[in-house]
Amino acid sequence: MGLHILKTTPFYSSSSKALLCTTTTLARCIGSNSVVPCNTRLRFPSSLPKAIICSISSSGSGRFLHQSNRRYRGSVVVAMAASGSIQKSEEEWRAILSPEQFRILREKGTEYPGTGEYDKFFGEGVYNCAGCGTPLYRSTTKFNSGCGWPAFYEGLPGAINRNLDPDGMRIEITCAACGGHLGHVFKGEGFRTPTNERHCVNSISLKFVPANSGQ
């Protein structure tokens, strides 16, 4: 299963799920085109907490691809699974999801408006897929649309897939890693957001992880 590290700040890890770096030490420590094995212990200072995006292949190596120009607050590490990397049978999903989670995530259901846990919630952190745990949205992209469901103006890069509904009326959004149904995306509604998009997401499709929680 591949992973993409989208955000790094001061952190120490020996996990195969994280390769951490800051811009000041990247060239010195691993070189601009080096491949770093998983489980390599890396520790870097915090002088420039910019994002380094990398991929980690199933063979156990990672290659850094490029540096993001965006800076981030807090000390959250956001790593996401590669597209389509989490495959389970219907029986396996039923075993790990509640009946309502299964109805929405796997059968493309919808929760009643205004009833979701995260509709009016605005804590700082990251929203993961409730099915597979893949990070999907930063809390900084959430806004109050008044629609009755959590609304975000963009997902994490590569975390969300878009597909036209069979009736051609709406665009469905799903978790890129496991295919879990999230909701729908709408564009051009006039909201004052950077993308002029509204990701209308079922609360039950999400699991909020607070900033600095260590998860």
Image (tube, grey):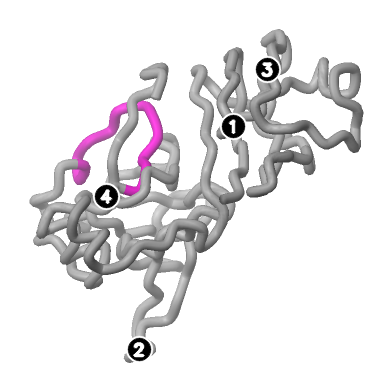
Residue 124 painted magenta? yes
In this rendering, position of residue 180 left or right of residue 109: right
How far is the residue under mark 4 from the one under mark 3?
38 Å
The first of marks 4 and 1 along the sequence is 1
Q: Can you give x and y, in whole percent of width and height, for residue 41 in the image?
A: 68, 17
Q: Which residue is mark 3?
A: 41
Q: Which residue is mark 2?
A: 166
Residue 30 lies, with reference to residue 70, above or below; the image says: above
Give the residue displayed 31% in from the left and 59% down from the top.
200
Q: Residues at badges 4 and 2 in contact (C-beta under 8 Å)?
A: no
Residue 118 position by quadrant: top left
Label 4 or label 1, whichever lies nearer to me, is: 1
How far is the residue under mark 1 from the one under mark 3?
10 Å
**Which three-letter amino acid code belongs to the residue tagged 2?**
Pro
Q: Which residue is mark 1?
A: 16
How far is the residue under mark 4 from the one under mark 1?
32 Å
**Which three-letter amino acid code belongs to the residue tagged 4?**
Pro
Q: Secondary structure at mark 3?
A: loop
Give the residue displayed 20% in from the left and 45% down from the top.
119
Region rendered in magenta: 118-129
Q: Residues within 10 Å of mark 4 (few under 14, many from 20)?
A: many
Q: Which residue is mark 4?
A: 150
The first of marks 4 and 3 along the sequence is 3
**Which three-letter amino acid code belongs to the residue tagged 3?**
Arg
